Amino acid sequence: MTSRVSFFAALRRIGAVVIFAGVFLCAVSAQTPPPAAPAPEASHAAPGQEHAGGTEMTAPAPEESPDLGSLLPKDLSPWGMFLTAHIVVKAVMIGLAFASLVTWTVAFAKALELIAAKRQLRRALGVLAQVSSLAEAREQLSERGSLAAALAAAMAELRLSSDTIDKAGVKERVASRLERIEARTSRLMTRGTGVLATIGAIAPFVGLFGTVWGIMNSFINISKQHTTNLAVVAPGIAEALLATALGLFAAIPAVVIYNMFSRSIASHRALCADGTAEILRLVSRDLDRAESEGTGMSRSNAILSVAE
């Protein structure tokens, strides 16, 4: 929830900066003077011009103003704007591109992990629903998976509790072991999703930093060239907007993928809870069956027979 709120707050700030850049561009284009028309060539000397040695003296030509069109980059594609950007803006763009690469890498890896884990859990749940004892479940379940580990922990607790006579205490200790295994499995499934939350929260602000730096470069160029011509302002504004776009490109998929994984991990946690409940039912059923079938058998021997 916090990452989602910060993401929308960053979007509002970026929108404000983009609106300011648009207003600034409109003001600059409105203040740009039209090109002056060339002066007609004088066919005759101006009145009062002096002649020396029969040679007509002409006034010196005015200095030509620099061509501001040459200040524009030759290539305004995203790659061309990246190559001509300031070193700080380049570092921001590279960082955001790397964050996007990390987002999609984590997305593919975690998606494959969750698909495989859910498939294994459903298969194990089908086995546990069909068996009637812990011994049958141990024979049919594979040695891999969280439910196999939970079953092994339940069997180990039954062996350790073979010298006790309190059946309720045995069930409580088995439930405690299963609860810890379930919590550990949930922690393993959430590993890597924190990176997505971090990228989704800070990527818009990193892009906003590149935007501010690009606009600052535009003002610096204005002070150096002593003009508000669009050719002076456009490069800085272009690289600023490109940094904003890269920030959104990195943040939006990260937030969407993080929310998808949150729902998928919650579903995986529910499947684990169903599996541990099935194992607890098998433990209770075996304890009751051993106690009812063992005529004259003590409770400790009944627990030991279940563990074996």
Image (cartoon, grey):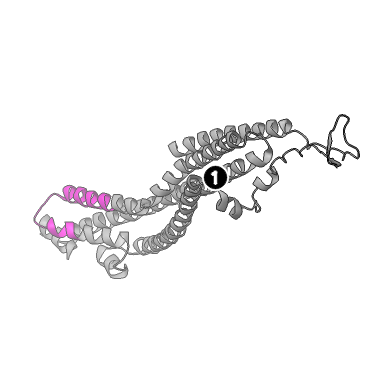
- Residue depicted at x 27% and y 49%: 179
Task: Tell me, yes or no, whether the highlighted magenta stretch contains residue 249.
Answer: no
Residue 160 percent location from the top left of the image = 12, 57
The part of the image, by quadrant, that contains residue 143 is bottom left
In the rendered view, does 77 fall on the left or right side of 252? right
The part of the image, by quadrant, that contains residue 79 is bottom right
Quarter that holds the N terminus: top left
**Camera-side residue of 167 and 193:** 193
In the rendered view, does 29 fall on the left or right side of 196? right
**Camera-side residue of 108 and 144:** 108
The part of the image, by quadrant, that contains residue 217 is top right
In the rendered view, does 24 fall on the left or right side of 165? right
Quarter that holds the C terminus: bottom left
Residue 144 percent location from the top left of the image = 31, 66
Q: Is residue 188 visible?
A: yes
Q: Label 1: how many residues lie within 10 Å, few (<14), some (14-19) or many (20+)?
A: many
In the rendered view, does 76 fall on the left or right side of 165? right
- Could you tell me what secondary structure mostly forms the magenta stretch? helix
In the image, what residue type sits under mark 1?
Answer: Ala
Residue 169 percent location from the top left of the image = 16, 48
Q: Is residue 295 visible?
A: no
Q: Where are the magenta residues, as a range?
A: 156-181
**Residue 269 drawn above or below residue 126:** above
* Pointer 1 residue: 243
> Residue pushed farthest front?
53
Residue 226 percent location from the top left of the image = 63, 33
Tally of numbered discs = 1
> Residue pushed farthest right?
43
**Mark 1 falls on what kind of element?**
helix
- Residue depicted at x 29% and y 54%: 281
**Camera-side residue of 200 and 211:** 211
